[in-house]
Image (tube, helix red, strand yellow):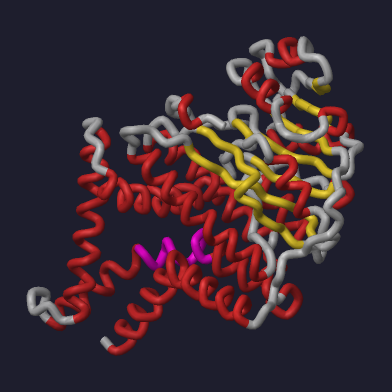
Amino acid sequence: MEFLAYFFWIALFIIFYSYLGYGILLFGIIKLRRLLGLGKPFQGNEDYQPKVTLFVSAYNEKDFLDRKVKNSRSLDYPEEKVTQIWVTDGSDDGTPDLLRKYAGVQVYHSDERAGKIAAMNRGMTFVNTPIVIFSDANTDLGKNSIQEIVKLFRNPMVGCVSGEKRIYSKDADSAAGAGEGLYWKYESQLKKWDAELYSVVGAAGELFAIRTELWQEVERDTLLDDFMISLRVAMKGHTIQYNPEAYAIESASADVKEELKRKIRISAGGIQSVVRLRSLLNFFKYGTLSFQYISHRVLRWTLTPLLLLLIIPANFVLAKNEGLFDFGIYSFLFWCQVAFYIAALVGWFLENRQIRLKVLFIPYYFFIMNLSVYLGFGRYMKGNQSVNWERAKRGGINPQTAP
């Protein structure tokens, strides 16, 4: 029983640390650094305004083309310094032909559908600007996004800049929308602190940029291209910085089923990334970057979901030994777990009946996130996760919130 108690408290600590403790620790470290006058922002040359390439990999995106091209042209950056490149591998809905009608848009099409990373590897051979900015076809960029990204590249140590992913809000969010929106707000704050401490741990594929000279081809079966590309830049000694004023905005997944499909792919890709970036676990070589990587990413994709499952029977045995209804510490924590998963179940029940109660969507979304890790691990082990686009259906866009 003593061993079980030790296991329970260690597991509980790791779970807490993965989701909240790391954020609390980061906040404390950042506050201390500010008091000591450390980590002041790099100013650099304010006239720095290099040529950039807006790079979009697309598969059957005809419904978004006009909106995306117009949005890209409306960004506040000298037009003569912006090149638009679209790579349309495998598109058979007329996407490449429609794109060629827009003046100044470079289109590189291949009939073969080999996946997004293959398209990126091929398309990068046509980039000849010092900065390349990756974005998705179905996202709108904030008007000042290029300016805000370029500003951070004034620092020669910065090799990658991640923008912020935002979710269009709706008056009555689904579980996917409410959960995803809250999750990304929390993630955005963690990224701000990560960047201030040293480096963000991975970029958001909706909007991120790298120095073109730091690009290296990524394995064709890579599932999380944005994560692998950005972390490999960081492993070369450069930092990944974050600017929430540069943002990409899109609608949330249409429902939790669609969000789960997206999360399973991300989880499979996360496990694949942990395996391929295993050298990044070496604290002696990568120091602070390793600490951030393990705390913010590795635990969530590996150990923590397993412990969330194992802690339930461990807590039950300890609570039963203590007295399930005596409300000691173990029985209290056990019933808290029961209440949390009941709330998740009720959230699922209400979602299926189109009843909106956000307070219950949060535990439901948390459950979905961790369920996706198990399902993603299964796909990774079976090797049956396709590298081709598996775009989740998105909910409607509220034009009042568009940038």
Query: Quick one: 121 or 171, which is closer to the camera?
Result: 171
| Residue 161 screen position, x and y as percent | 72, 51
- Left or right of 113, for residue 11: left
Residue sitting at x 41%, y 54%:
370
313 drawn magenta: no
**Residue 215 seen in the figure:** yes
Residue sitting at x 57%, y 55%:
271
| Residue 391 screen position, x and y as percent | 54, 30
- Left or right of 245, for residue 299: left
Residue sitting at x 74%, y 43%:
147
Chief SS of the magenta region: helix
Magenta stretch, residue numbers: 299-308
| Residue 377 screen position, x and y as percent | 50, 52
Residue sitting at x 76%, y 57%:
232
301 drawn magenta: yes
In which quadrant will I find the N terminus? bottom left
**Residue 282 seen in the figure:** no
The number of discs equals: 0
Q: Quadrant of residue 126?
A: top right
- Left or right of 354, for residue 16: right
| Residue 356 screen position, x and y as percent | 25, 37
Farthest left residue?
325
In which quadrant will I find the C terminus? top right
Farthest bottom residue?
2
